[in-house]
């Protein structure tokens, strides 16, 4: 019974600085983001309700991004307060195992990690999408569904053909500089169709090619026939949408939709390293709340009487070290130099291991 009372007492001391820190950081973030977009507000003059709606809809994402700092800072402040009142010393003198006393830290870390995962997957993807819409249409005065030209597009067809286009114009359902090629099992070219322009007929589901050259090759990749046509129709399984490479905001996709998006990119022959890193980070980043607690707990127990300024410094150094390693690991993973799984989980594994080793040095 005494053990559980002490653990509840520790949780009480943790919750107070956590709530205060959460509110202060949320408020500072709102103010910072407001002034960061002040130039757009002055230029395009969005309505007050649009500004408030944007900031409120975006605030959950900003808050969860810096939640690990709040999590660790609340822990360090709680331990510091207990130390300054002499309660931590009294607890040790009474023979209470310090590990059992701080055990709620791990439960708190797990709870915050699960909460972060839930919000990232089921709340923030919707709030971010709405805030981005407001930002585009009200802050930048852009068209809601504006389609842009894309250049040098490559696509692997459903039947094994390889397509390239110098320019894709979704508004006209048109490809310029269109090339369609097929290869044998040894990747020797068999046929090639070069067209100045290809237009997708949505109503009849067919492509019309203009100023076309059709070539056939032998096993030595020598041209054996070549024909010219001003226009020709080609029934392909691909539509204009398959050639349009949308680069969606990955933060607005939950892990299921992101996995489906990665699969579709692979089928089109596109690189997916960046998307795969983001997919794995949807599971690894929420655990940062637990990881920074494990990593920072040793320093909180080591510097019990060092003051809140020192605790704040340790918090900043710890979290910035974590983010630094995460940033480098993610950047390298985005380029494909290391597997996406390792890129996303390396910071967690590294800092958890270091934190666990340091905790073994704490006198119980």
Image (tube, rainbow, N blue to C red):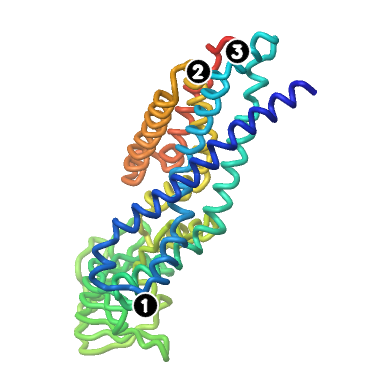
Q: Secondary structure at mark 3?
A: helix
Quadrant for the C terminus in the image: top right
Residue drawn at the location 29% of the way across and 56% of the way down: 36
Q: Secondary structure at mark 2?
A: loop
Residue 184 screen position, x and y as percent: 35, 62
Tell me how many marks there are: 3
Q: Which mark is residue 304?
A: 2
Comparing 192 with 164, the one in front is 164
Q: Do residues under tags 2 and 1 come within 8 Å of each other at their CB atoms?
A: no
Q: Between tags 2 and 1, which lies in front?
A: 2
Residue drawn at the location 32% of the way across and 66% of the way down: 162
Q: Say which residue label 1 marks.
A: 145
Q: Which mark is residue 2?
A: none
For label 2, the crowd category at 10 Å Cα-Cα, with few meaning under 14, some 14 to 19 and many 20 or more, is: many
Quarter location, residue 191: bottom left
Residue drawn at the location 55% of the way across and 28% of the way down: 78
Position of residue 355 relative to residue 360, above or below, is below
Residue 33 screen position, x and y as percent: 35, 55
Residue drawn at the location 58% of the way across and 51% of the way down: 118
Q: Earlier in the sequence, mark 3 or mark 2?
A: 3
How far apart are the alpha carbons under marks 2 and 1? 56 Å
How far apart are the alpha carbons under marks 3 and 1? 63 Å
Comparing 120 with 53, the one in front is 53
For label 1, the crowd category at 10 Å Cα-Cα, with few meaning under 14, some 14 to 19 and many 20 or more, is: few
How far apart are the alpha carbons under marks 3 and 2? 10 Å
């Amino acid at each position: 019974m005494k053990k559980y009372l002490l653990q509840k007492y520790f949780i009480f001391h943790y919750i107070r600085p956590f709530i205060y820190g959460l509110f202060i950081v949320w408020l500072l973030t709102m103010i910072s983001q407001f002034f960061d977009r002040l130039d757009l507000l002055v230029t395009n003059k969005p309505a007050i309700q649009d500004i408030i709606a944007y900031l409120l809809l975006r605030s959950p994402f900003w808050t969860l991004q810096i939640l690990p700092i709040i999590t660790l800072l609340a822990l360090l402040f709680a331990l510091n307060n207990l130390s300054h009142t002499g309660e931590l010393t009294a607890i040790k003198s009474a023979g209470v195992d310090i590990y059992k006393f701080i055990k709620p830290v791990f439960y708190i870390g797990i709870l915050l990690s699960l909460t972060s995962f839930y919000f990232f997957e089921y709340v923030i993807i919707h709030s971010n999408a709405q805030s981005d819409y407001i930002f585009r249409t009200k802050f930048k005065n852009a068209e809601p569904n504006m389609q842009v030209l894309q250049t040098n597009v490559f696509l692997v067809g459903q039947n094994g053909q390889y397509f390239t286009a110098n320019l894709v114009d979704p508004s006209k359902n048109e490809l310029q500089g269109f090339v369609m090629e097929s290869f044998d099992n040894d990747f020797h070219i068999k046929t090639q169709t070069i067209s100045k322009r290809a237009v997708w007929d949505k109503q009849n589901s067919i492509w019309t090619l203009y100023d076309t050259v059709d070539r056939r090759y032998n096993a030595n990749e020598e041209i054996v026939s070549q024909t010219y046509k001003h226009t020709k129709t080609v029934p392909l399984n691909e539509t204009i949408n398959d050639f349009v490479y949308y680069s969606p905001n990955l933060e607005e996709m939950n892990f299921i939709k992101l996995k489906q998006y990665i699969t579709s990119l692979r089928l089109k022959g596109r690189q997916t390293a960046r998307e795969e890193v983001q997919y794995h980070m949807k599971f690894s980043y929420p655990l940062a709340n637990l990881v920074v607690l494990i990593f920072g707990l040793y320093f909180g127990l080591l510097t019990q009487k060092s003051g809140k300024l020192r605790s704040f410094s340790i918090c900043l150094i710890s979290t910035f070290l974590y983010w630094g390693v995460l940033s480098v690991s993610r950047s390298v993973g985005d380029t494909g130099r290391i597997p996406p799984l390792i890129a996303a989980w390396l910071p967690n594994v590294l800092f958890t291991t270091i934190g666990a080793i340091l905790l073994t040095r704490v006198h119980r």
